[in-house]
Image (cartoon, rainbow, N blue to C red):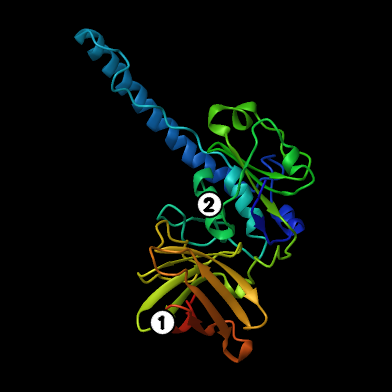
Amino acid sequence: MAYAKIPLSWDQLRAGYKTYDPKELPGEITTQLKQWNDQVEKDNDEIKKNNELIEQQNRAAGIDPDKGKKALKGKNTSCVMQLSLGLNSTSDTVPQNGAKLRQNTYLMGQYMILSVDELHDWLDWQYGRTDAVPKGDMSSIKGKRGILVMGSAHVELWDGEKWLQAMDSRFTSGASAFPYWFWEVNDGTATGGSALPGWLLGWWEVYDGNYYYYHFAGSGRVTYIKSKVASRGAPAPKTPSNVGKAVMDDTVHGPIISWAKIGKTPATVEKFTRLNWTSETDMNGRSNNYGELYARRRPE
């Protein structure tokens, strides 16, 4: 299977990660979860009352008694916040802007992702899409360490043999726990020339007579849009104008981007050279289709 690679230190990620054990999970997270879940219980009490009324009305009308009922809200769990702690102990900290057009939660002096779906989106954008683990067969990730996302239900660290926490089966084998998605953490080393250096990651403003905004992910995935973004740490676009792959190339002293072919125009290839060969904020480039380019990294 072709699992996406995360060029971070496993040891740093694991050291920052905290399990749900009350002796280990920070009290700030426990307190915040209680506040949220107290509100969930209040909301569910109201939903139950309304559902009882709806059922009475439906029975009186001779129709399906469950028609129009609302589902109860699920309680918040700590798994994604636990992983956020781990990520925030590495060079790829969780940004302020979330994957669902909302800000990530600020707690304990750092930003945290809250939902499994949002984490999945962020991993896709930051490190590239990955393959699903064959259902019922973990052999393809045996010996690999990384992040395991279980459908929309749960997220775990995988140490090469097992996930780190003993889990309730509803999180690991329930209907919402599949498919399993796996990103391999490969101890901060580049893989096949595709992993990009930290200074390049995030948003850049590119000019060729018009302005474009490029987002570089650690996996080498590049996307662009035409609308201005607020900061370097803003999330990658959900609907980019195009998607490409970037690799670092010593012969040009910078990244080479190969964009996906659109229509009848030949696929665009752009070669960028760092200003003075060392700059981490400015690059000059040339496109095989559109000429000269100038790129500047967006501010934080």
The residue beneath circle 1 is: 207
Of residue 55 and residue 248, the one placed in the foreground of this image is 248
Instruction: Judge the density around disc 2: few (<14), some (14-19), many (≥20) Cα neighbours within 10 Å.
Output: many
Residue placed farthest to the left in the image? 61
Decide: is 2 above or below 268: above
Identified at 46% across, 60% down, the residue is 97
Residue type at tag 2: Ile
| Percent of width and height locating residue 90 | 67, 62
Residue 164 appears in the picture as rendered? no
Residue type at tag 1: Tyr
Identified at 57% across, 34% down, the residue is 178
Mark number, residue 279: none
The residue beneath circle 2 is: 113
- Which quarter of the figure has residue 187? bottom right
| Percent of width and height locating residue 102 | 41, 55
Decide: is 86 above or below 215: above
Element at badge 1? strand
Q: Is residue 188 left or right of residue 31?
A: right
